Image (spheres, rainbow, N blue to C red):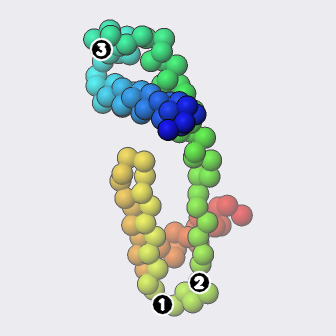
Amino acid sequence: MTKATKEKNAAVAKRAGWMKQVGEWERSSQTQRAFCAERGLSFASFQWWRGRLARSDAAKVKVPFLPIALGADRSAGGAVIEIELRSRTRVRLEGEAALRAVDRLVARIR
């Protein structure tokens, strides 16, 4: 294994460790300071990694909508739209309700 590969693996492991810590803090009811103190983590490092991870997550989500293709045949009634929110809640529209929702959305965008 080359030195560059070892360094990359170490960086990936470090990032994964901080992702785990930040995730555990998010699920806890503790303040950042209390969480860090309990685990012997540097508060400054925790804040730095939390910010870095949040920025990298935000950079991945640049397109709020995905393009969809609409067929020309609207009489089929078999249209289905399913939206999954970040909270894992799903909204599903079928048939005419889906077609009306798309019509209203497109009308607002124009």
Rate crowding at label 2 as few (under 14), some (14 to 19) or many (20 or more) other CA atoms within 10 Å. few
67 relative to 69, above or below: above
Q: Earlier in the sequence, mark 3 or mark 1?
A: 3
- Residue, far right: 110
- Residue tagged 1: 76
Q: Position of residue 43 (x, y in %)?
A: 43, 11
Mark 1 neighbour density, 10 Å: few (under 14) some (14–19) many (20 or more): few
Residue picked out by circle 3: 39
Which residue type does callout 3 highlight?
Answer: Arg
Q: Quadrant of residue 52?
A: top right
Q: Nearer the viewer, residue 51 or 42?
A: 42
Mark 3 crowdedness (10 Å alpha carbons): few <14, some 14-19, many ≥20: few
| Mark 2: amino acid | Gly
Report the residue marked by disc 2.
71
Q: Amino acid at mark 1?
A: Ala
Tag 1 and tag 2, C-beta contact below 8 Å: yes
Q: Residue at x 46, y 70 (%)?
A: 81
Residue visible at 44% across and 84% down in the picture: 78
Q: CA distance from mark 2 to mark 3?
A: 55 Å
The kind of secondary structure element at disc 1 is loop
Farthest front residue in view: 1
Above or below, 55 against 82 in this view is above
SS for tag 3? helix
